[in-house]
Image: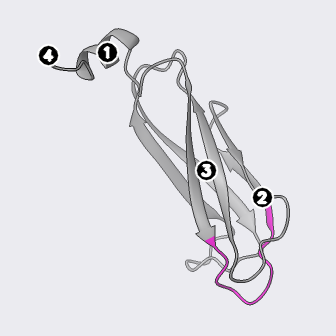
Amino acid sequence: LPEGPIAEYSFKFKNVGKEPLIIQGASASCGCTVPEWPKQPILPGKTGEITVKYNTQGRVSPFNKDIYSQSNAVVPDGRDRYELHIKGTVLSKDDYDKKHAKKK
């Protein structure tokens, strides 16, 4: 990713349960990562998404961030939340431009 813009990724999911899925909240492992989640219940068979925004400004380096979502869903391993992960590498503008320059 180039340094500067906000990077965004959406985790799409489907409610495969028999009850409405209610996401009570989502949080991230640091303030540079901001999750947004559906505030309305997701009915059985319907889909939703959790969108994560990562601020790349001033963060030239590899990154690996965790996002935690709390809901009324049963988590298979017995924990009280689902964990999502994003990772990548932020390059300086010059390094990004060099790496992605079109060959003539």
Residue at mark 4 = 104
Is 52 above or below relative to 50? above
Residue at mark 3 = 67
Sequence order check, earlier mark of 3 and 2: 2
Q: How far separated are the C-alphas under marks 4 and 2?
A: 46 Å
Q: Which amino acid does label 4 sit on?
A: Lys
Q: How far separated are the C-alphas under marks 1 and 3?
A: 30 Å
Residue at x 77% of width, y 72% of height: 42
Residue at x 24% of width, y 18% of height: 101
Residue 4 picture location, percent across and down = 53, 17
Q: Is mark 2 on a helix, strand or loop?
A: loop
Residue at x 68% of width, y 82% of height: 45
Sequence order check, earlier mark of 4 and 2: 2
Please say which color scheme the image uses: one colour
Residue 44 picture location, percent across and down = 73, 83
- Depth check: give the residue in front, 104 or 62: 104
Name the quadrant containing residue 91.
top left
Give the main secondary structure, helix, strand or loop, of the magenta stretch: loop
Sequence order check, earlier mark of 1 and 2: 2
Tags 4 and 2 touching, CB below 8 Å: no
